[in-house]
């Protein structure tokens, strides 16, 4: 379990101006105990949390105050300031909520005074004409109506001013939004302000509805009524304004219907009015003049599809459908809305409008369910499942249940479910639902559809919940098997498993209601378990996997006792149907069932063995089965448990050891990944269990055993865990022998890394707990180091990471002689002619750099011992990195000088790319934030850049040649040789390297500076420093040059990344901007001179790193 860091609450402080502070000081007492003193102290605080605590003291202080004192001017001034503070705070500030709570708790004698204070402050704010202040005033209106009683009284008093403010602010915000057309960010902000204005207007009408109805509609000439008419006109304009956000238009639709409901009289005619609007049959002579003036756009023009949709939504959401307050007129409106929505469904193609439509149709079905509670027979007939309206809605469901949008698909499921409930309500008490023709016909239609229709599954599930499973099973008992067969496709597996769960749960409920005892279970097993077992034994791999993952856990959750039945059947079949490399067989099915049952807590492993369910030999057979998934399931049975601290038995330990011995060399990467994941769960359980046992042992040693007896000996358990983990480590280290396969090494190193991660090396750790460092002797250290020689880099990475975790606790790396031999091997590998050897050298050097004793190694007859300058106060990693790079650079500079004389000699004895690769790898270890030897690094970086340019000049002629593969031609034709001569002269570098002086002919002698050598079949013999004869081929020269150019590019790219950020401004920069510019010119030069893609990509790799630096 991961504990999230608790987020710190940010509370902005409020600040009072000088005049208000002086007023508080004038009323403060010398003791600082009255209300003014508390407020003054609170205003002077600079921490919002402290201000909250101070505000909370106000109500207790006022409750203690004498009634006669409450009329004091001091109290009046303090209430004025409290009202000002409340209105000045941001809506999201916790201080506002605390202050609202305090104002709610004011003593009764102060409520009227506090209300007048708040009215005075808020009245001034409602007069604001600044666009930037409108949103804050709207928020304050909402806060007053939501949080505090005196706020509601305040808004009641200022109702006219509030309505005028909303009318003025909404119009100005919309006008400003039109002006900012094209500025999306500013427009979006204004749109949200506009949305808030509409919402606050609706809240004002809903909260103050009684006051409005009593005082406003009888006074059509008052300003409040005129403001409401103005707002209604504005909201109708929003419905037709396609430039607004759809959320604004949708909310405006709600507001229009709400205002009509509040203002229109008589209320019984409102449903007719809205029906006529939707149907386009409204006559102006039938409505009051004020409605014509305010809603002229709705009355005179043909309504667009979007306006119709928003009005339907408003009518469904804002009108009362449940209480029958609108009378029978509501029934006609409901049917007209349905007809309008169904018509729109054929015309609205936009995805967002389609999603809105589906949601509104769902709302319509909910409204229909509400109104059916008190409806007439006519409406029930109109909403019966066989009616035209319901039939069209079902057609809508069928057309959209596989819509690309999740929201639409989800809504169609709700619509279908509500349609079933609507039909139930219409025939309630008159017919048995299980034999109802509508339900039976619907079931037949759904079953006749193909199983690849995803909408079929949720609809069938709704039907089963409504009428039960009996009719479906009567029609076709193979329905469960048919659904299971679909689960070979993962996209259908969740749908199928959900439907099956609904079915077998319903079937169990039905059987238990008609049969006594456990008689029901045999029939249930035949229907739901037997098809499952057939698939697990003989089904294809994907189908068996998805059935195990999706279906089996739900089945066991419904009927845990079915596990015994499965085990009995599968064990009987396992003897004859063991399975193969292609099929799981009964044994594989048994392992899958046992694994799932244990992982979900339905079985304990001790019960599996000691209860006689399965034998150890059977599990062993599964652990070494030919089929990969059977082995994984058998291992999962041992490793997975629903309890993280469940103890591991001896039998489990022996079986795990048995598995590891035979399964480390799996050739499938996916299987290796699953093995490591499952064993990680086991090791975590061992760690958690050992921690619990260790605590138990400590408690046991401190307390009297007689008073606190324990059932098991924790010390013995800890020792078993140590022995088991030691045995596992022994198997894993033993698998790292020289010549072991890549899968074996990969799996072993991964598991050792997991063990090191789970059982960390800690100082002062109890000896009773397992410590992996105790398992690593010198021979095993050498096995890990030898893994660096693997040709697979992922093995090198795993070995490096493991050694980095272990080396602080290993004495092996404290010996300078051991470090010296490793260092010499790394240096030798860094100049190997085998490309993968330089990678090995890089990992080995990077590991040695972290050793504190590296400067103590003894270099006999070494000219470069002075590169190591240990500093006891500095970071050893930085010093070692600096020394190793210097050492590599000095060797490389000598080799470059030799390469300038003969590339053949370099390619055969010391291809320089290995040194450069090691330098680049070492640079990755440095941390720009913790460097101390800046001057040395700057000097070294300058040398590295110069070396890169020099080496590039040596190898670039070969790389940039238009035909580098032809430098040693495969022809013996003299004419061909003459044609190649021009190419050789073109790429000749500025030195005396005779490699470029003439074309070499096969089976003919040629003269070299180093002596008379022969070339035979593209091979040239040269002699290195140790007088050893080497064969040099064209490919060796090409590898030397091309890889050197690639490593130069990567090194220069890495050096560019040393360009300082904030850590090294100014003179502390390791690399200057001018140097980066020069590197950019270098890349540009080589990119432009590259004649083919391969040469281009060599420079491109470093150039990308340069551009990343320039873009940050």
Image (tube, rainbow, N blue to C red):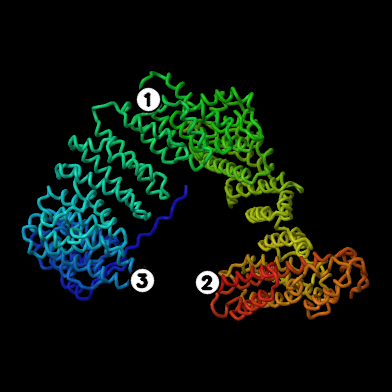
The quarter of the picture where residue 828 lies is bottom right
Badge 2 marks a residue whose secondary structure is loop
The residue under the point 30% across, 67% down is: 190
- Residue for point 16% across, 49% down: 272
- In the picture, the disc for residue 328 is none
Lower sequence index among marks 2 and 1: 1
Residue 524 as seen in the image, left or right of residue 363: right
Toward the viewer: 363 or 136?
A: 363
Residue count near mark 2 (Cα–Cα under 10 Å), binned few <14, some 14–19, many ≥20 = few
Q: Are marks 2 and 1 in contact (CB under 8 Å)?
A: no
SS label for mark 1: helix
> Would you name the residue on which mark 1 appears?
510
Q: Residue at x 58, y 74 (%)?
A: 1059
Compare marks 3 and 2 and give the one earlier in the sequence. 3
Select label 2 or label 1 by which is in front: 1
Residue linked to disc 2: 1112
The image's mark for residue 183 is 3
What distance separates the C-alpha of mark 2 from that of mark 1? 67 Å
Q: Earlier in the sequence, mark 3 or mark 1?
A: 3
Q: Residue 914 in the image: state x and y as whole percent.
A: 74, 65
Q: State how far apart marks 3 and 2 are (Cα).
A: 27 Å
Q: Is residue 697 visible?
A: no
Looking at the image, the residue that sits furthest to the left is 218
User: Looking at this view, is 600 or 763 the one in front?
Assistant: 600
Q: Bin the neighbour count of mark 3 within 10 Å (Cα to Cα): few under 14, some 14-19, many 20 and up.
A: few
Residue 102 pos. (x, y %): 20, 58
What residue sits 27% from the left and 37% below the top? 387
Q: Is residue 389 left or right of residue 915?
A: left
Q: Residues within 10 Å of mark 1 (few under 14, many from 20)?
A: some
């Amino acid at each position: 379990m991961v504990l999230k860091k608790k987020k710190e609450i940010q509370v902005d402080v409020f600040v009072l101006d000088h005049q208000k502070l002086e007023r508080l000081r004038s009323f403060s007492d010398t003791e600082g105990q009255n209300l003014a003193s508390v407020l003054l102290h609170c205003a002077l605080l600079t921490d919002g949390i402290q201000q909250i605590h101070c505000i909370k003291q106000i109500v207790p202080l006022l409750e203690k105050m004498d009634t006669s004192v409450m009329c004091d001017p001091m109290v009046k001034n303090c209430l004025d300031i409290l009202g000002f503070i409340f209105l000045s705070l941001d809506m999201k500030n916790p201080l506002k909520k605390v202050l609202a709570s305090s104002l709610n708790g004011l003593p009764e004698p102060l409520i009227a005074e506090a209300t007048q204070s708040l009215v005075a402050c808020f009245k001034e704010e409602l007069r604001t004409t600044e666009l930037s202040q409108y949103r804050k005033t709207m928020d304050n209106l909402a806060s007053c109506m939501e949080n505090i009683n005196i706020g509601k009284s305040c808004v009641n008093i200022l109702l006219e001013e509030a309505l005028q403010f909303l009318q003025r602010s909404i119009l100005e915000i919309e006008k400003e939004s039109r002006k900012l057309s094209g500025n999306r960010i500013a427009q979006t902000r204004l749109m949200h302000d506009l949305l808030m204005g509409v919402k606050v207007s609706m809240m004002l009408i809903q909260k103050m509805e009684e006051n409005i109805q009593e005082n406003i509609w009888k006074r059509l000439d008052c300003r409040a009524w005129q403001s409401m008419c103005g707002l209604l006109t504005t909201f109708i304009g929003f419905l037709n304004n396609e430039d607004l956000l759809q959320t604004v238009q949708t909310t405006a639709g709600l507001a229009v219907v709400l205002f009509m409901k509040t203002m229109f009289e008589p209320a019984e005619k409102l449903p007719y009015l809205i029906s006529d609007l939707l149907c386009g049959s409204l006559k102006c002579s039938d409505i009051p003049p004020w409605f014509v003036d305010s809603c002229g756009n709705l009355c005179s023009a043909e309504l667009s599809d979007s306006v119709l949709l928003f009005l339907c939504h408003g009518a469904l959401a804002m009108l009362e459908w449940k209480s029958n307050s609108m009378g029978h007129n509501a029934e006609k409106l409901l049917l007209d809305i349905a007809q309008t929505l169904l018509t729109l469904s054929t015309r609205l193609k936009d995805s967002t409008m389609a999603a809105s439509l589906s949601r509104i149709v769902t709302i319509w079905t909910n409204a229909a369910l509400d109104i059916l509670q008190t409806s007439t027979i006519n409406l029930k007939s109109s909403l019966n499942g066989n009616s035209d309206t319901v039939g069209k809605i079902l057609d809508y469901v069928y057309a959209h249940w596989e819509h690309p949008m999740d929201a639409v698909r989800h809504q169609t499921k709700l619509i279908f479910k509500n349609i079933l409930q609507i039909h139930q309500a219409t025939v309630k008490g008159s017919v048995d639902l299980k034999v109802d023709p509508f339900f039976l016909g619907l079931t037949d239609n759904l079953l006749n559809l193909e199983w690849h229709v995803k909408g079929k599954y949720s609809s069938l599930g709704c039907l089963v919940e409504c009428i039960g499973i009996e009719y479906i099973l009567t029609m076709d008992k193979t329905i469960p098997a048919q659904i299971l067969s679909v689960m070979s496709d993962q996209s259908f597996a969740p749908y199928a498993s959900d439907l099956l769960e609904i079915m077998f749960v319903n079937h169990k409920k039905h059987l238990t209601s008609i049969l006594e005892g456990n008689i029901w279970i045999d029939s249930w097993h035949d229907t739901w378990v037997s098809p499952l077992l057939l698939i697990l034994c003989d089904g294809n791999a994907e189908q068996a996997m998805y059935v195990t993952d999706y279906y089996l856990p739900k089945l066991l959750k419904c009927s845990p006792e079915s596990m015994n039945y499965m085990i009995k059947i599968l064990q009987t079949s396992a003897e004859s149907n063991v399975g193969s490399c292609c099929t799981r067989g009964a044994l594989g099915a048994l392992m899958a069932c046992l694994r799932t049952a244990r992982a979900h807590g339905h079985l304990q492993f001790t019960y599996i063995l000691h209860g006689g369910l399965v034998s150890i030999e059977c599990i062993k057979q599964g652990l070494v089965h030919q089929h990969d998934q059977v082995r994984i399931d058998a291992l999962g049975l041992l490793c997975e448990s629903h309890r993280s601290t469940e103890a591991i038995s001896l039998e489990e330990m022996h079986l795990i050891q048995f598995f590891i011995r035979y399964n480390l060399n799996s050739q499938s990467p996916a299987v290796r990944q699953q093995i490591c994941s499952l064993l990680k769960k086991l090791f975590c359980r061992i760690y958690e269990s050992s921690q619990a046992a260790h605590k138990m042992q400590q408690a046991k040693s401190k307390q009297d055993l007689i008073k606190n007896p324990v059932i098991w000996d924790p010390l013995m358990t800890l020792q078993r865990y140590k022995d088991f983990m030691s045995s596992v480590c022994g198997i894993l280290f033993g698998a790292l022998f020289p010549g072991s396969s890549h899968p074996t090494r990969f799996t072993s190193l991964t598991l050792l890394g997991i063990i090191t991660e789970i059982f960390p090396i800690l100082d002062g750790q109890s000896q009773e707990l397992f410590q992996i460092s105790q398992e690593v002797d010198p021979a095993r250290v050498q096995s890990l180091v030898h893994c660096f020689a693997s040709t697979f880099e992922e093995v090198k990475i795993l070995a490096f990471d493991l050694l980095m975790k272990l080396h602080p606790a290993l004495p092996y790396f404290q010996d300078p002689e051991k470090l010296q031999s490793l260092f010499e091997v790394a240096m030798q590998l860094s100049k190997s002619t085998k490309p993968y050897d330089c990678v090995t050298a890089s990992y080995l050097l990077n590991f040695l750099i972290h050793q504190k004793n590296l400067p103590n190694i003894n270099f006999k007859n070494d000219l470069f011992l002075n590169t190591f300058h240990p500093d006891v106060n500095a970071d050893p990693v930085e010093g070692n990195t600096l020394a190793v790079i210097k050492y590599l650079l000095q060797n490389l500079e000598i080799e470059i000088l030799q390469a300038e004389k003969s590339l053949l000699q370099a390619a055969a004895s010391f291809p320089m790319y290995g040194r450069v690769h090691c330098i680049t790898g070492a640079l990755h270890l440095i941390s720009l934030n913790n460097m101390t030897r800046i001057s040395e690094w700057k000097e070294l970086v300058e040398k590295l850049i110069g070396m890169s340019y020099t080496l590039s000049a040596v190898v670039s002629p070969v790389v940039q040649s238009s035909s580098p593969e032809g430098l040693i031609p495969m022809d013996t034709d003299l004419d061909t040789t003459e044609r190649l001569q021009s190419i050789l002269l073109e790429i000749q570098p500025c030195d005396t390297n005779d490699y470029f002086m003439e074309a070499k002919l096969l089976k003919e002698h040629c003269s070299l500076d180093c002596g008379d050598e022969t070339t035979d079949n593209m091979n040239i013999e040269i002699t290195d420093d140790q007088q050893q004869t080497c064969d040099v081929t064209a490919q060796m020269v090409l590898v030397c040059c091309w890889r050197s150019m690639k490593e130069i590019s990567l090194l220069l790219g890495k050096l560019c990344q040393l360009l300082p950020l904030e850590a090294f401004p100014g003179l502390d920069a390791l690399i200057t901007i001018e140097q980066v510019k020069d590197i950019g010119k270098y890349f540009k030069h080589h990119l432009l001179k590259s004649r083919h893609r391969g040469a281009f990509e060599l420079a491109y790799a470093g150039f990308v790193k340069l551009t990343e630096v320039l873009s940050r």
